[in-house]
Image (spheres, coloured by chain):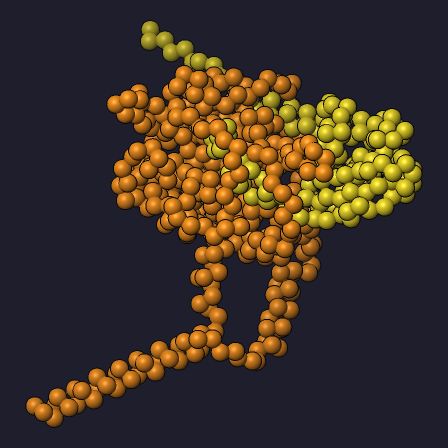
Chain colours: A orange, B yellow
Amino acid sequence: MYVAVKGGERAIKNAHAWLAEERRGDPSVADLSVAQIREQLALAVDRVMAEGSLYDPDLAALAIKQARGDLIEAIFLIRAYRTTLPRLGASRPVDTGVMACDRRISATFKDVPGGQVLGPTFDYTHRLLDFMLAAEGEVMPAPQAEPCDAPMPRITGFLDRDGLIGQEAPSDDPPPDLTREPLEFPADRALRLQALTRGDEGFVLGMAYSTQRGYGRNHPFVGELRVGMVAVEMEIPELGFAVEIGEVVLTECETVNQFTGSKTEPPQFTRGYGLAFGHSERKAISMALVDRALRWEELGEDNVGAPAQDAEFVLAHADNIQASGFLEHIKLPHYVDFQSELELVRRIRAEAAATSAVRAVAE
Amino acid sequence: MSCIDTRKEWMGLLARAPAGLLAELCAGLGSEPGFAWLRPPETGGVMLRGRMGGTGAPFNLGEMTVTRCALRLVDGGAVGHAHVQGRDRDKARRAALIDALMQTARAEECRDRVLVPLSTQMEQQRQARAARAAATRVEFFTMVRGED
């Protein structure tokens, strides 16, 4: 039961005023601009875009500022804003095969056509705090080399050509959209991928890690990881043709996993797939591992009861806005709920006390 | 440099253009021609799609902000459309105006003063990233380990 309670307006108003002041911090320290967040906290911006499910770096940076750096709160702000936008349409599926790659690596083949390109990575850094960053110094420009315009074909394409990996069935059917229809189970792979790409990075990482530790192990190799810019094209009905409407940075991970096969089909590798907004490697790799774990049924594997194989468990708990909404609501007033429980427990105690008093008299 | 010969190509270029650069280049065309809105700028979301495994069936990846508009030039009545990434109404208006002007006698002027410099600068930026990426390409070499 909900009962409206009045009061607290002044306290709430003053709390929000104080929040604004705390957000600003020490006024003798320069104010942080949205552009500074967008440019210098770019990976936080990417995470807010991926889990907020809206690609707009300026809005994500503003949300991070407003949320005082609480990324889940920032994601909440983006999700709320997103619901106010009219849907103008859907893009054509992006072609990550022609991505302008900042980074492209393969853990399965050393000598891949197009090469191994490390890009701006934390990998191979020593994870030692760099106190030089505390002293504001100029950054040296990064070295450059002659750009190589050779195409970077998909690694899985080579395996595919030889029939060594399961094929992706080509299709152009419009996919289901969980922002339009509530997520229901069983969820097909398109829905699972949509839920995973906007899912909480920490949750998806934990699920992926659980498969590596043996809860539904699927022996993944990172066949390929690529990060870079892809063009977004949309069909414009008024024009009767498709035009590019922008470009986005995406991270894509294709895993090559252990085999399936049967009496009629020779064994072949299987795939997991991750694709996320921005430079989000941990997310994309985690997504690929969980995608692969959730495919147990279509690949004819046993359900060993691992959490990462349970689509309902994974997808219903991956969304950090749903989760934190339900979790955090319990800190809001529940006075009446609690009052009823309090009365109940007092009555039970009184009854128990009365019963034992009667028993004592009887003895 | 990307091609700008067809309407599809110049519309794509305008959509991807940095708003500041587009404004700067459009200023070079003098005062804006008179126009009437067919559809005033409207910001909305476009659902981006990817493909499973990069090549398979499509799935929904998430939305992106897009601003669209359509206008008709007072002089001659050419219609310009724009669907541009982001929430910048001015950018959408400029993109639609250039699209309209490209269908008029001022096409050559628009190409020289706006589209070509836009394309050149954006290509330079792309090359600057590609050059940095190329410098991080791994050159493997094999260590020869002699046993004797």
Q: Residue at x 43, y 21 (%)?
A: A160
Q: Residue furthest top?
A: B148
Instruction: Give the quarter of the figure containing the C terminus of chain A.
Output: bottom left
> A120 above or below B137?
below
Question: Residue B53's x, y, as percent?
Answer: 47, 30
* Left or right of A300 on screen, residue A71: right
Question: Residue A86's x, y, as percent?
Answer: 65, 51
Q: Is residue A329 visible?
A: yes
Which residue is nearer to you in this view: B77 or A333? B77
Question: Residue B94's x, y, as percent?
Answer: 81, 40
Q: Is residue A122 visible?
A: no
| Quarter of image, res A290 | top left
| Quarter of image, res A188 | top left
* Left or right of A36 on screen, residue A182: left
Q: Residue at x 65, y 45 (%)?
A: A88
Q: Residue at x 60, y 22 (%)?
A: B134
Instruction: Give the quarter of the figure containing the N terminus of chain A.
Output: bottom left
Q: Residue at x 76, y 25 (%)?
A: B6
Q: Residue furthest left?
A: A363
Which residue is nearer to you in this view: B71 or A208? B71
